[in-house]
Image (cartoon, rainbow, N blue to C red):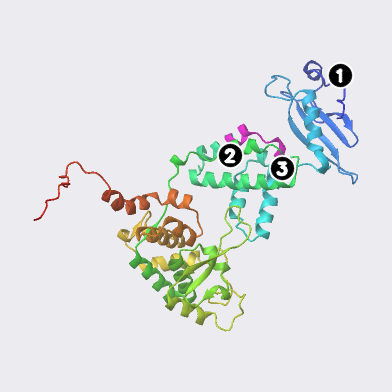
Amino acid sequence: MARNARDTRLESRTQRIKLPIAKKPVWLKLDKGLALGYRRNEGVGTWSIRVADGRGKNWIKAIGEADDIDDHTGMSFWAAQAKARELRYSGPNATSRRPPTLAEAMTAYRADLELRGGHIKNVTRGLHHLSPGLAGKLVTMLTALELRTWRDNLRSNTGRPLKPATVRRTCSVIKAALNYCARLDVRITNAREWNEGLRSPDDSTITHRNVIVADPAIARIVATANDLDPALGLWAEVVATTGCRPVQVTRLQVQDLKADPARLLMPSSRKGRKRQIRHTPVPIPAALALRLKSASKSREATAPLLLKSNGEPWRSGDHFLPFLEAVKAADLKQSEVTGAKPSGVSAYALRHSSIVRGLLRGLPIRLVATQHDNSVIQIERNYSRHIAHVSDSLVRAAMLDLSAPLASNVVPLTR
């Protein structure tokens, strides 16, 4: 264990306050290539570390405030030394490279997601909402209090407050980025700080906006999409029939189409911690299977099953504007849409409608979850009102109604 360094100028707050206010810290060498710095400010002073990178250069980073005023809000001289050594050394994987900042952790996680074919939009959105001070802070120095304050400010921002569901998604992606970096750097041991600070808001404040469209209206949307662009119509029919996510359509290959019986081996979406793509057999009508087979004729087994009208594969977001145009042309009525105005119907409404259709027709929740690449917990949480509607008749059949005459248990005997 390394010995603590001594410096009468920095050991006590009384001596530190006597130092002149300066822009540059006073440095104390702790070890070869490692130094602790103290900068005297007009208010509370700050501790910094300077570490040699082994290539003739150094990296310098502030690690926190000093206990010049309050023992409970700042680090002492001895605590600052311990923190400096912790940031540089940690077990057998000692390294002179500094731990990542929160912004660097988010960027590294985005690159990993992109490499795995995942969605990076939420990471980009999370980076956009980070404050400059929080983005530039070392991951190892994050505290639950500052993360919780930032999270709450997203909801109370007077300029443009975020909805609770958006705050939850933003916090989730930041936690995922921090967990990713913690797995790669043994010096990052403060997972409790971000687990507490970025805890999701109370679910009671979050309303699940599931837009449900009546079956006749869905048929009109698919028909109008087919009139506008046959490739878009085929895309919309696959989503409406299977209830898959749009990203799953982009991963369908020619070999995923099976004719007997007619079904698609639907690839998973890689949501959450899913690393590998699984394929779930999803039944489809025979007529749709014939159209898909005809459209993919003469293509290789590993080629995309669905292509745009220009011959290019569907990418994430390519469907958005064309689908809105098809919805507008379908002229939906408010009585045909639940949960939004007719103009607010997106491709995800086809997925929600498919899940609710399965529940209302008595399919087991486990089967509905499997067919839609979801979990039973999420189905019960997001579609509980529809589950209650289905179970109502079953519960009533077993319900005791004391206002109704009870059946007699006396059976007359015959001669």
Which amino acid type is marked by label 2? Answer: Leu
Which amino acid type is marked by label 1? Answer: Thr
Dot 1 alpha-carbon crowd within 10 angstroms: few under 14, some 14 to 19, many 20 or more: few
* Residue 8: mark: 1
Assess whether residue 137 is covered by the magenta stretch: yes
Q: What segment carries the magenta color?
A: 136-148
Query: What x and y, as percent, mark residue 89?
Result: 82, 38
* Residue 198: mark: 2
Which of the two discs, 3 and 1, labels the residue nearer the N terminus?
1
Q: Which residue is mark 3?
A: 101
Question: What is the spatial separation of the Cα atoms under label 3 and label 2, in whole angstroms?
Answer: 17 Å
SS at circle 3: loop
The quarter of the image holding the C terminus is bottom left
Question: What is the spatial separation of the Cα atoms under label 2 and label 1, in whole angstroms?
Answer: 40 Å
Dot 2 alpha-carbon crowd within 10 angstroms: few under 14, some 14 to 19, many 20 or more: many
Q: Left or right? Give the position of 239 relative to 214.
A: right
Dot 3 alpha-carbon crowd within 10 angstroms: few under 14, some 14 to 19, many 20 or more: some
Query: What x and y, as percent, mark residue 145?
Result: 61, 32
Q: Main secondary structure of the magenta part?
A: helix
User: Which quadrant of the figure has residue 296?
Assistant: bottom right
Q: Is residue 92 visible?
A: yes
Which of the two discs, 3 and 2, labels the residue nearer the N terminus?
3
Q: Is residue 290 above or below residue 380?
A: below
SS at circle 2: loop
SS at circle 1: loop
